[in-house]
Amino acid sequence: MIQRKHRKRSQEEAEINITPMLDIVFIMLIFFIVTTSFVKEPGISPSRPFAQTAATKERGNIMIAVSRDDHIWMNKNRVELTGVRQMVEAARAENPESSVIIVADQSASTGMVIDLMDQVRV
């Protein structure tokens, strides 16, 4: 009888190469360690003093708006350009630390905004 040579089929074992994954994990770990902000917490929590006679200061802003058709609005009232200076001076007399904020529409003319800025300078 003829013997057949039985070759064992060499089966390769299926394995997952985790080396690239470990490289990525370590790189991410180093990244997070380096970018973490370390906050040093104090060992004790001191009680801070407070003033009994402290007065709170209200710092109000003076809002002036310029509409697209170059109308000036202040405190929800339409104001002429010539009256802006008087209203700003009156508001600053009440609260000297107030700031003037001009909000102009995108379509408002630049000349009107410049004239308004000239009037606001007190």
Image (cartoon, helix red, strand yellow):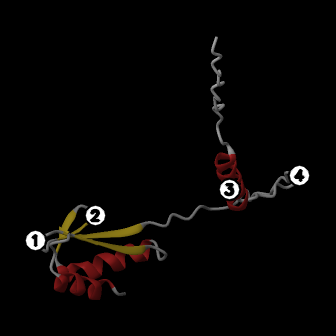
- Choose mark 3 or mark 2, whichever is in front: 3
Is 59 left or right of 7, judged from the image as shown?
Answer: left
Q: Is residue 38 above or below residue 98?
A: above
Amino acid found under the numbered disc labelled 3:
Ile
Residue at left 65%, top 29%?
A: 10
The spot of residue 105 in percent (x, y) is 20, 69
The residue nearer to you, when weighing 101 against 121, is 101
Disc on the earlier residue, 4 or 2: 4
- Choose mark 3 or mark 4, whichever is in front: 3
Q: Are marks 3 and 2 in contact (CB under 8 Å)?
A: no
Q: Is residue 39 above or below residue 90?
A: above
Task: Write down the residue under mark 2.
Answer: 75
Q: Are marks 1 and 3 in contact (CB under 8 Å)?
A: no
Task: Write down the residue under mark 1.
Answer: 69
- Choose mark 1 or mark 2, whichever is in front: 1
Q: Are marks 1 and 2 in contact (CB under 8 Å)?
A: no
Q: Residues within 10 Å of mark 2 (few under 14, many from 20)?
A: few
- Choose mark 4 or mark 2, whichever is in front: 4
Residue projecting furthest to the left: 69
- Dot 3 lies on which element? helix
Residue projecting furthest to the front: 1
User: In 3D space, how far apart are the residues under numbered discs 1 and 3 (Cα atoms)?
Assistant: 58 Å
Amino acid found under the numbered disc labelled 1:
Asp
Task: Write down the residue under mark 4.
Answer: 44
Q: Is residue 70 above or below residue 30?
A: below
Disc on the earlier residue, 3 or 4: 3
